[in-house]
Image (cartoon, grey):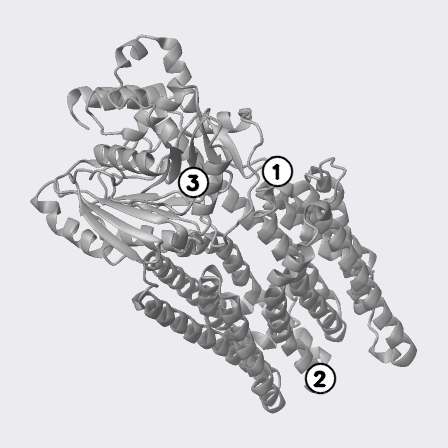
Amino acid sequence: MKDEQRHPKSSVVAISTSFLRVRQAAFSIADQALFVGGTFLANVMLARTQTKEEYGMFVLSYSVFTFLTGLHNASILEPYTVYGSGRYRNRVSEYLRLMVRSNAIVGLMLTGSLLLVCLFFAWFAPHLLSRSFLGLGLTVGILLSGIFLRRAFYLEGKAMFAAGVSLTYFVTVALALWFAVRAHILNGFSVFLILALGWIVAGAVFAGRLPFGKTQKTFLDFEPKYWNEHWKYARWVLITAFVFQLTTQGYYWLVAEFLSVREVAELRAMYLLIGPVDQLFIALSYLLLPMLALHYASKRMDKLVSLWRKYLLATVGATVFFAIAVRALGKPVMHILYAGKFDGLAPLLFVLALLPLLMGIGNTVSNVLSAMEKPKLVFWGYVCSGAATFLLGIPLVLHFGLRGAVYGMLASGTTYTAALGIAFLFVDHKSARQEAAPAPPSRVSSMASGVAPVSGRSLLGRVNHPTNVAPIALFVYNRPEHTEQAINALRDNDLASKSDLFIFADGAKNEADAAAVVEVRRLVHSTEGFRSVTIIARERNFGLSKSIVSGVSQLCDEYGRAIVMEDDVVTAPDFLEFINRGLDRYQDNTRVFSVGGFNLPIRVPSSYPYDAFFSYRFLCWGWGTWKNRWEKADWSVSDYPKFIANREQQKRFDRGGNDLTLMLGRHMAGKIDSWDTVWAYTHSKQDALAVLPVVSKSYNVGFDGSGVHCRRSPFDQAPLTSRAIMSYRFPETVVLEPYFVSEIQRIRHQSRARRFARSFCDRLGLR
């Protein structure tokens, strides 16, 4: 299985997977465009039909809404997104209902607060009360609920429905704006009512598709201390959003205070033409942030930096091109959109077109820092930007008027980018120092292969084992970079200091591999951070299968159980916890033959209540087993002639994917050296099952052409979480879920054409 399992399925499935990813991205971009398009259309219609003073009051009111949107995102949406797709993924229905209620409460509180402010102005300063602000007060809860609805569909992986919500919203707003213009009732108050109407219609059409479920218990019945966890996560995001919104919306209020509402309208009219490129970068960050986080979680800082550089170059190229386009087309576009009312602002628009370039560079760094889980540094970047807004923005506005506001925005953007750049350099330097620093001492021993056991001692030279934590067998050969990643990731596990690590270093196959083998052995001899480290250096080349079979057999004989790792597999911080708990949980259930740490790209139903499931298919990228199961394996597969003549046995084996029988045949023919196919066959022969995690705890980094058995990734792997989870819900009874069985069969399916082509190539000796 080692060779075949790490190759793509059929090209049809690969194309289908790519198509699905592109389709999701397209729906995401369409959703963002339609969502922003409704507001953009409302702004343009107001700017065209109302006085600059009336439009300026709407802009100030909408800036308050934008400010509240940022706080709503930080306090409700982002924690909901992170927790709903992470630790509470198995309580989606209950969690959704809790968040819907919380969103409704926040909306009602904001509505009441804004209406009280309106009442205060009506009594004590009626000249300060605008109908735009009153419209905001009446509709703020509905507007925030519409945004929540979109996000809920993203949590379900249904970007198509989110795009449908935004399309319904956009069409409703467009029709209502047309009617309001024809009826001469369009103003700042009616625009907020129109925007709210758009969300009401969209909610009526799509809200019923959310997975509310029919459970009697509430989410807090399961997680009574949830709000403490919510606040721990949200506090830094909330304060960052507060500073960010205060900074970005602050210029409208500075202009209103020191100039006039008329200039507020002019500043907003210019910024509306700059906004589209910001939306492009928002959509781009949705796609790239998970990839950056994946590289960081997988300890691949070189790839993270490489991706960031490409991201940076793309951002600079796009913003420079946009600035040139504004220079060439900005004046006629402004004239058409605003019916000539803002033509005199064209020179300032050309200057403001530099803002996306300055902010875009900083945003790429912000995404990197977010991927590296450094929210405090992002916060301080916004603090610096906010300081520039007031320390530089106020004098510039006072001395240069509206032009000074534009210069101030550029200064704030430059400060933001510079602060984040310095923070990133600091983090990079600190990481380098930590990697160079010595780790806590641990016990390291070394032994060569072929040493005979001594009477009265164990096979590995150990007497007592004062721990129930399973030993780890790590198999290495000639890839020092991958080996270092694997060891570092294991060392980051909470159970590493309680685990005995046995590193089996295979001997060089030939002279070409000798130097790399020596380098790997030099590297592993400095391994620290575990309860003990024992190095078994092979004097000759065993090959992967023989090395693993003999190594795991030694540890199982000695400890009764073992965790098995290879040099191209990195792990999440809770990998060892999950495997050890699974080994404890199913130790006495002899139908379970292995506990795996890797899962295929399967979307888990929201109603599934556990953190693990049973599978016909064994997956070899980080796993554990017990002695009384491991010794059931017949590594020569002596009954293969009977198996290949029995179609029913083959169907039984292929319940884990129709590629298994073919791979076993290739192994028996000597085409591949695949110990894990034989181990999978042992599962089938014994009618045994593997336990797999709902959220993958391991990730294979070996698809770079450096390995013998790993050449191309067979499927997308889920990014590893950087947060250790110490409480797992394992199924109480050994029952196969049909959904997981069919999903694994779908992902590991090979078409007849592909199987025929592979068999044909084998016969010709082309593989």
Residue type highlighted by circle 2: Glu
Instruction: Residue 725 in the image: state x and y as whole percent.
Output: 52, 50
Instruction: Residue 682 in the image: state x and y as whole percent.
Output: 35, 22
Viewer-nearest of discs 1 and 3: 3
Residue closest to the eye, 13 or 695: 695
Residues at discs 1 and 3 in contact (Cβ within 8 Å): no
Element under disc 2: helix
Q: Count neighbours of disc 3 (C-alpha within 10 A) and say few if under 14, some if 14 to 19, many if 20 or more.
A: many
Circle 2 sits on which residue?
Answer: 257
Circle 3 sits on which residue?
Answer: 597
Quadrant into which the C terminus falls: top left
588 lies left or right of 183: left
Question: Disc 1 and disc 3: Cα gap in Å?
Answer: 21 Å
N-terminal of the two: label 2 or label 1? 2
315 lies left or right of 48: left
Residue closest to the eye, 87 or 749: 87
Question: Disc 2 and disc 1: Cα gap in Å?
Answer: 50 Å
Instruction: Residue 634 in the image: state x and y as whole percent.
Output: 29, 21
Q: Count neighbours of disc 1 (C-alpha within 10 A) and say few if under 14, some if 14 to 19, many if 20 or more.
A: some
Residues at discs 2 and 1 in contact (Cβ within 8 Å): no
Q: Count neighbours of disc 2 (C-alpha within 10 A) and say few if under 14, some if 14 to 19, many if 20 or more.
A: few
How many marks the image carries: the answer is 3
Residue type highlighted by circle 3: Gly
Circle 1 sits on which residue?
Answer: 606
Question: Disc 2 and disc 3: Cα gap in Å?
Answer: 59 Å
Element under disc 3: loop
Above-or-below relation of 245 to 100: below
Residue type highlighted by circle 1: Ser
Element under disc 1: loop
Numbered circle sitting on residue 208: none
Above-or-below relation of 688 to 79: above
